[in-house]
Image (cartoon, grey):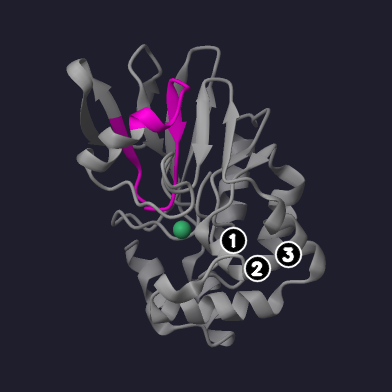
Amino acid sequence: MADIHANMAALSAVLDDIKRRGGVEQVWCLGDIVGYGPDPLQCIEIMRRLSDVCVAGNHDRAATGRLNMAEFNPEAAYACRWTAEQLKGEDIAFLDSLPEVAARQDFTLVHGSPRQPVWEYLLSISGARENFSHFSTRFCLFGHTHVPSIFRRTEGGGCSFSPFSPNIGLALGQSRMIINPGSVGQPRDGDPRASYAILDDRVRMLRLYRVAYDISLTQAKMVKQNLPVKLVSRLSRGV
Ligand code: ZN
């Protein structure tokens, strides 16, 4: 899962969905546990307990002061300052302990990209193509764009793009891929439902799921904390 963004209602719905599907052996987190949303402490607590591996996102780094907020837009910066005020010592220590890159099986895990793990947005085929030489495993999982995506290495050093559609299994074969499972807490592909993926390593298949959650509950908490209206309203639209 990626980009939980302190959205407890979305995270709970995803965890319930995983349980309903029979559970998983490990939880891999692709960063941005906090930022934007109203529940940073709860989300940190749960991911500290549940995740087997978690890489750092730009919001995780900015919330503890290890990354400058200069490149954040005003709403993100406001939410980041609010998040920083909520964090206690142990939360800061946990976020600061997260590595920028991790590897599990034949997957490299990053928040942004293999080339720039915390900051680069992988939105284009050309950007993705350049990144295949920056990791050595067959596959890479990333977040940051909040858009479920598949970049596939093609013959002769090319690259193709396809959206990562829900419920259809993505076969993990010979070709290298850079894959985004979408965002749990702030989807931006026009579908407001929480997004995550399950890897079934017996059949070498990665499957994306979308889960409806109580968006209004998260929005009410954001309004109560005076978080920016723009961040509140985008959750309903999934943008
Ligand atoms: Zn994010």
Amino acid type for the residue under numbered disc 1: Asp
Is ligand 1 closer than 8 angstroms to the Cβ of mark 3? no
Say whether marks 1 and 3 touch (CB < 8 Å). no
Residue type at mark 3 is: Ile
Tell me if I can see residue 6 in this picture: no
**Rendered view: 203 above or below 211:** above
Q: Which residue position is annotated with label 2?
A: 64
What residue is rendered at 68% in x and 28% in y?
Answer: 25
Image position of 92 (left or right of 124): right
- State the residue position of label 3: 92
Residue 107 vs residue 44, the one in the foreground: 107
Q: Secondary structure at mark 2?
A: loop
Q: CA distance from mark 1 to mark 2?
A: 7 Å
Amino acid type for the residue under numbered disc 2: Thr
Q: Is residue 155 left or right of residue 175?
A: left
**Label 3 SS:** helix
Residue receiving disc 1: 60
Q: Quadrant of residue 17?
A: top right
